[in-house]
Image (cartoon, rainbow, N blue to C red):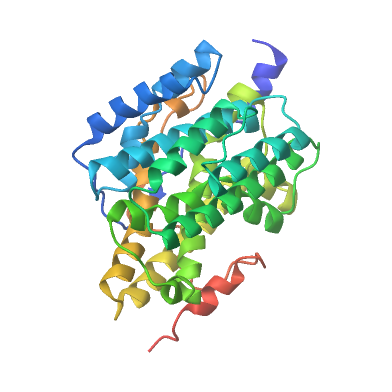
Amino acid sequence: MSCVSEQRLVQQLPAVPFYCPVPPARHRAVEVLNDQTVRWMLQQRLDTDEQQLKRLAVCDFGGLTASTMPYGQLEPLTLMSKFHAVLFSLDDGVCDESEATADLLVQETSRIMRAVESPDAGSPHDSPHTAALRRLRLELERYASPRQLRRMTDAMRVYTSGLVWEASWRGRTELPSLDDYVTLWMRAIGMAPSTAMIEIVGGFSVADEDLQDPRVRALTEITWTLVSWDNDLYSRNKELERADDNLNLIDVVCQEQDCSPQRALIRVVTMRDRVMVLFDRLSAQVLDGANEELRRYVNGLGQFVRGHLDWASSCPRYAVPTGPKATPGGWWKRQPADDSLEPLAIPTIAWWWDQLEPAR
């Protein structure tokens, strides 16, 4: 075994169980969703590397969509599944595992945003990803209102700005601060457009004033953050195996708190569970007295957190043959590692806890 391989194995960490009190659910059309998405993705030729295409084909985009959005009609669900396929391909081929610089990514994301803002204005310079997103944006008009299209465009702007920020850090030897990383990753994970699709897929519309309620904005950001942190927990070994990539919450905590990866893992799980407890408590407060549309949106946020984990628990994308095996406790646990309602010492998100009503 080479020195590099030994170093990667030392850096790899055991799998950890997740705390998530949201019940599981899955759309019955999961197989149809996945079949249609894979065939469409291959037709788009999002990647030229055959090995990468094979990896994408087994990502189970239908399973991800069916588990995170187990509601709605097949047509908008299929649109969401295709959207997942493009974002995963973009992440692998242009962001995480390529030689693309931040400057090149600025050009690509600028073209993507132009395609989203004005999908009828085609360009000969469209990359396969931009062209695919242009087609999906045009198709979205069949299911979304002008207000929802505006929200989706704003969400894509959040996402693409996060990609550029992420790329700027991947070119450095040092890591960002914990506060910066939390902000960066909640944007770059692609959750802003995903949560914007909840009401479109569900066939309802949430009032602007409800979405702008600080409690609802906090719940939306918490959803982005939980998905991004969960991704870091289960995907870190894969990233080390394939790209020797340490832009991960565990490694950022190692730097921030000057501790070992093993100690950082414990601290990250504690942080993550405290945020999950906050989500559970705050969503219950918002649901108390919420109208039907807001209720469906908040429940959709919780389902995305749970469904994302259900999908990741069996997705071949994250299997690392040389990595550590799952812990005896399995993928799930019944109790959080930390159920405190005190804010985490992370300034960019501390305001979430301010939205909780005082204990009666």
Query: Which picture quadrant has residue 4?
Result: top right
Residue depicted at x 74% and y 33%? 104
Farthest residue, direction bottom:
360
Q: Examine the rendered structure and indicate whether residue 345 appears above or below residue 240.
A: below
Residue 88 vs residue 250: left or right?
left
Residue depicted at x 63% and y 55%? 182
Residue 321: tell me if it is visible.
no
Farthest residue, direction front:
121
Q: Which of 263 and 332 is in front in this view?
A: 332
Residue 339 vs residue 178: left or right?
left
Q: Nearer the viewer, residue 287 or 82?
A: 82
Residue 295 vs residue 273: left or right?
left
Q: What percent of the width, then of the height, locates residue 125? A: 65, 28
Query: Which picture quadrant has residue 17?
Result: top left
Q: What percent of the width, then of the height, locates residue 42? A: 42, 19
Quadrant location of the N terminus in the rendered image: top right
Q: What percent of the width, then of the height, locates residue 43? A: 42, 19
Q: Examine the rendered structure and indicate whether residue 179 appears above or below residue 14.
A: below
Quadrant location of the C terminus in the rendered image: bottom left
Count of all numbered marks drawn on residues in the image: 0
Q: What percent of the width, then of the height, locates residue 141? A: 39, 49
